[in-house]
Amino acid sequence: MTSEEVRKLFLSFFEKKGHTIISSSSLIPTDPSVLLTTAGMQQLKPYFTGDKDPMTNFGSHRITSVQKCFRTTDIDEVGDERHLTFFEMLGNFSFGPVGSDNPKDIGTEGYFKKSSIDFAYELMTKELGLKIDWVSVFQGEKSVPLDTESIALWKEKGFTDKNIQQCDRADNFWGPTGDSGPCGPTTEIYVDGIEVWNIVFNQYFQDEKGNLMPLKLPGVDTGMGFERLMKVIQKTETVFETDLFEPLRSRVLDAAKNIPENHLRIILDHVRGSVCMIADGIYPSNLERGYILRRILRRLSLKLKQNNVQLKYVPDFIGAVSEKFSPHYEQLKNTQRVNQIFFAEVEKFDATLGKGLRQFEKSVSQSDTGEQLGQKLFQLYTTFGLPLEISRDIAQERGMPIDSRAKETFDALFQEHQKISKQPSQKA
Ligand code: GLY
């Protein structure tokens, strides 16, 4: 199955079960406590808390979507086999009041654990023909009990204690996004050893201090990483060989034939992420989400340079993302503005990199560590504009990780520099 077929199948499966299909919201969230949209439920927080009425806005208590997401937690890990910053998330949502919670009663009322698990099982096994290896449930902690209801529901489907794992808060309790909001225990579905679907039972509201209070009406919030799902469906080595990365992958390979696999992955992830961020209205800057965009564009520039990919290919890469996503995301139909912003930033940094990389070769040696290394990296930053994260990337590739003493030295010199120059805080 192609990703386009799966996208359609997912949405129409839930539409047939009474869900209203809604568009992805922007990567710039309405919730000021987060910098970027990290999950499908982000735009739906007020419906879980009862502050907005789903019937008025969607004509149903059931919603489904494919949401553009960006997560920064693993930004430095991109390049390995599985980490992504930008991804799409397939989701189905229910906001109370709960109807009969019988999956056969397909109406516009809300549902809870029974219907969520039934829908997920039917979609995975019957519609997509996948075999679920095992599932996990929340083991219980303090005021939140062991999720015996989910265990019983999975057992009805033939699962046993052997393939129902009980996990702790780190694995099986989700949310809130930002400093407060809906959250709750989860049940998660694993296929081919990969967690593909997270089903959250939003039973609680967590306040800024971390206190849990029961939500007036329970809700369901599910998130299935589209790339991971396509990896198990298309049986590829990693997510990067799925058709979700085409035609971008082929265009990058045309421009850089012998590119190492980790560099290719960084380029694929960062091109998709930065194009979608700019299309949603984010500009590269030294502040907040603008800085996240700048950071990925800089790392992307480094990988292009290290692989002798000329900047003339950049519009082809942007075009490939637009080709793939514009049928689903309006903002990606016209990429003129994206091209301008993207190109200007990459071109500017490319010039910095040229000098910075030469100087790195001259001044940093394999035996440098600690304070001396920190001082050299700081000089590369102040004199040649080479940011620490870029130096770190280059150093790591040469097998010389930046030790904590070097980092502390860099940070101390940076603070001092800030004080002296009396500039507003800028990140290196
Ligand atoms: N909101 C559920 C998830 O992101 O996994």
Image (cartoon, rainbow, N blue to C red):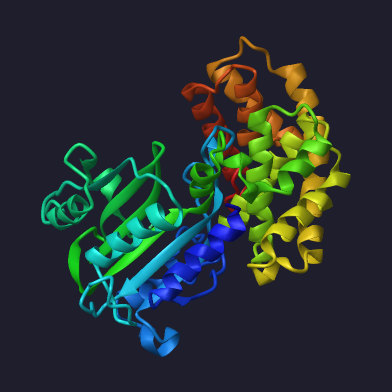
- For the point 23% across and 77% down, which residue is it? 98
Residue placed farthest to the right in the image? 312
Nearest the eye: 269 or 353: 269
Q: Can residue 351 be seen here?
A: yes
Taking 131 as reference, is 71 left or right? right
- For the point 49% across and 58% down, which residue is it? 89
Q: How many labels were placed on the picture?
A: 0
Residue placed farthest to the bottom in the image? 56
Q: Can residue 177 be seen here?
A: no
Examine the rendered structure and indicate whether residue 246 appears above or below residue 52.
above
- Quarter-wise, where is residue 289 in the image? bottom right
Rendered location of residue 349, percent (x, y) = 77, 43
Rendered location of residue 104, percent (x, y) = 28, 73
Rendered location of residue 404, percent (x, y) = 47, 24
Rendered location of residue 403, percent (x, y) = 50, 21
- For the point 22% across and 43% down, which residue is it? 164
> Which quadrant holds the C terminus?
top right
Taking 347 as reference, is 88 left or right? left
Ligand 1 lies in quarter:
bottom left
Nearest the eye: 341 or 384: 341
- For the point 11% across and 54% down, which residue is it? 145
Taking 101 as reference, is 347 left or right? right
